[in-house]
Amino acid sequence: MSESIGPLLPADEGFHHQIADTFGTVASSDLSWTEKVCAMAAARDGSLQLGFGLGKYTNRNVMDGYAGISRGVEQVTVRANRELLPEPDRTVIGPVRYEVVEPLKQIRFILEPNDIQPIAFDWLFTAELPAHLEDRTHMRSGYRVSADLVRYHQIGVASGWVEIDGQRTEITPQDWVSTRDHSWGVRYDVGQPRPDVQAMELPPEVSFRMIWAPALLERPDGSRYGIHLHYQIVEVTGYSSKTVMGGLQYPDGRTVRWRDLTPELRFDPDNRRLLGGRVHATDVEGGTRILEIEVVSDTGFHLGAGLYHGFEGRYHGEWQGPGTHLDGEWIADCSTHDNARRLHQIRDTVVRITDPVGGGVGYGNCQPIITGGDDALGLTKESTFM
């Protein structure tokens, strides 16, 4: 076999090739090349939430993932890591399993009973709306491109079961909502920070605000539609920038993009958790609306435990040796100042969104980050953390 051609995989029998190589090879030799799925399912009353993520790092010969539950301020997490070879297409790492039942319609997220934590689940995501491609993520710092990836998300409902300490709870589409996303490309925060590469940390005087929030809304007549809110706002003395993405999503595939999103949200100054508020939205057709956002409960899975932004010296895509490696932890109260810093801000917050213009009320997932000081919100520079 030529050393310039990747190994053959069963996928190479199909007519899906996009580059002049086998499916055993990705388009870039960058060690940060990642294919990742991330999903959550939550009871609409905020009593319980499930989190799941799985990543494939071809150039690192690694597949890793996490599965866990959030119940109020409590969080339980199982992490898994394995050598990619000899099954690079098998999306299983010990008890953590990802299964495509019907492409773009139904996906199974599974955590089998395990020896790490007394939790297990089997949840089936069923799409209520078509999958939606987001804008390309392209991040540049000086001359260096640190991220270049594409992503789609999808909004739906969940069915199945979850067990915690031997007690089983049924998951029904009437009472649970589910969201997922799938991305691939060169990604940030993969592997240990490299000591010979300039760090990309935001100075404390820089204010950075972001939310990523897909939600399923329902009108009184039973018809459903989706809302996706995504903005990034960077402000420092003499400079300001805003990026707005997302919009309204309908079952027939029609979308109406946002032109502008202006947040009026509140955050806890101690742990920077989202407390609720409103977002003023303007769409490209000129329509305006005020979206009320209510945080349903303290429930919200912290993605830091899934290695987002790192966790206790660990990062996505790390090589842990041959075989499968499992670990995890139970955290009784994620809302304390110390645990919030340990786990980072970004979490799958269960929210209720009211849209008076569209006539819908519904539930979804809001991932917020806010750094820097903001006198109006009672946030000081000294308390900032990602």
Image: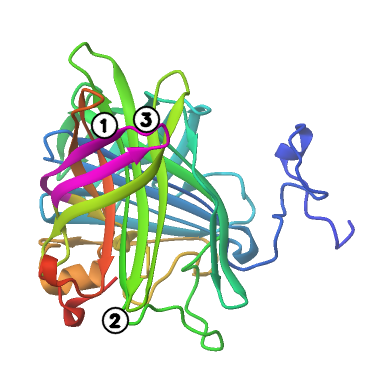
| Residue sitting nearer the eye, 193 or 263 | 263
Residue occupied by mark 2: 204
Check disc 1 and report its element: helix, strand or loop: strand
Give the residue at the far top of this rendering: 221
Q: From the image, which quarter does the N terminus lie in? A: bottom right
The residue at 32%/79% (across/down) is 237
Residue 94 visible? The answer is no
Upstream in sequence: badge 1 or badge 2 = 1
Percent x, y of residue 361? 19, 28
Residue 376 visible? The answer is yes
Q: Amino acid at mark 3?
A: Phe
Neighbor class of circle 2 (other Cα within 10 Å; few <14, some 14-19, many 20+) is some
Check disc 2 and report its element: helix, strand or loop: loop
**In terms of image quadrants, where is residue 384?**
bottom left
Neighbor class of circle 1 (other Cα within 10 Å; few <14, some 14-19, many 20+) is many
Give the residue at the far bottom of this rendering: 196
Percent x, y of residue 60? 60, 66
Task: From the image, give the main secondary structure of the stretch colored magenta.
Answer: strand
- What is the spatial separation of the Cα atoms under label 1 and label 2, in whole angstroms? 36 Å
Range of the magenta residues? Answer: 276-299
Upstream in sequence: badge 2 or badge 3 = 3
- What is the spatial separation of the Cα atoms under label 2 and label 3, in whole angstroms? 40 Å
